[in-house]
Amino acid sequence: MKTLVLSVVFAVTSIVNAVNNNSLEGFAYNTRMDGDRVETKNVYKVKEDKYLQNHLQYNYAYDAEGRVSSKEVSKWSKGNQRFEKQYCLNFSYDGGEVNVEYAAWNSKDNAYTDEEASKLYIKELLADTPEAEHSLLTRICQNMHTETLDIIMPPIKDQSSFDLGMIRIIQAKPVLQLYAAAHPEEEMNIDLIDNELSANNGYYYLNKGKCMYSHRRLPGAHEQLTIGQLTEKVFASEQAYMSLMLN
């Protein structure tokens, strides 16, 4: 199983949060203790400020020194009316470092599998200097026993890129108004088709930095576009990037 080594400060914070799980508005908690250790924690959604609905369950195990050795996460299934296992975090300790192993629950095999753990996803990597970032990535390579890393980052001009995620236009008219203003040299007659949001359907005319909308087709040649094709056209040259911080 693959391992991620975390710094001691971050690791200690993670372990504390793993046990305590700071309360959030709209949720209620019930904790079962074994002495001074958290054995099981149930998380409930609060409905109408008075009803509790099962949501998550955390089960903890500890090593001989009383440190958290595993955290098992289960989610309530309305259909089956029971908690069903989702994944497990296994902790091991080496001096001032904490190793964290992730294992997903495989319902077919009725066991945890390291299939997902063979890949490590870092949603945000923060470092004070390029040297510190290089040091962090090097350490990750060492502990993952790999010589290469795939790093997803904003597109760079003149370098190859690939689509990741999705983008779609919700309100076509204001977007095309902004596009026309940014590209006053472009003239387009667009016959737009949006099967999900019919309010976008219609004819758009871009000319001299302005965008005019019409329910009726005006004379002249038109380029028929789906909302997806329009999105690609509008953002093709923008090097669009959404930070993973938004997750």
Image: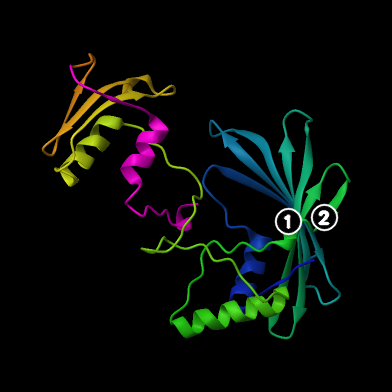
Residue appearing at x 42%, y 53% in the figure: 242
- Write down the quadrant of residue 102 in the picture: bottom right
Residue appearing at x 37%, y 63% in the figure: 158
For the residue pair 15 and 108, the one nearer the viewer reads as 108
Residue 217 belongs to magenta span: no
Residue 242 belongs to magenta span: yes
For the residue pair 130 and 228, the one nearer the viewer reads as 228
Boundaries of the magenta span: 219-247
Give the labeled residue for mark 2: 113
Residue 95, percent from left and from top: 73, 86
Residue 143, percent from left and from top: 71, 77
For the residue pair 83 and 124, the one nearer the viewer reads as 124
Spatial CA span between label 2 and label 1:
7 Å
Q: State the SS at label 1.
A: helix
The quadrant of the picture occupied by the N terminus is bottom right
Residue appearing at x 25%, y 30% in the figure: 173
Amino acid on which the number 1 mark rests in the picture: Glu
Q: Above or below — where is 123 with respect to 175? A: below
Crowd class of label 2 (few under 14; some 14 to 19; many from 20; radius 10 Å): some
Q: Above or below — where is 125 with respect to 247? A: below
Give the labeled residue for mark 1: 116
Left or right side of 134 for 218: left
Crowd class of label 1 (few under 14; some 14 to 19; many from 20; radius 10 Å): some
Residue 20, percent from left and from top: 65, 61
Residue 46, percent from left and from top: 58, 37
Left or right side of 218 for 142: right
Please indicate, yes or no, whether residue 100 appears anywhere in the rendered image: yes
Report the residue that reaches farthest toward the front. 221
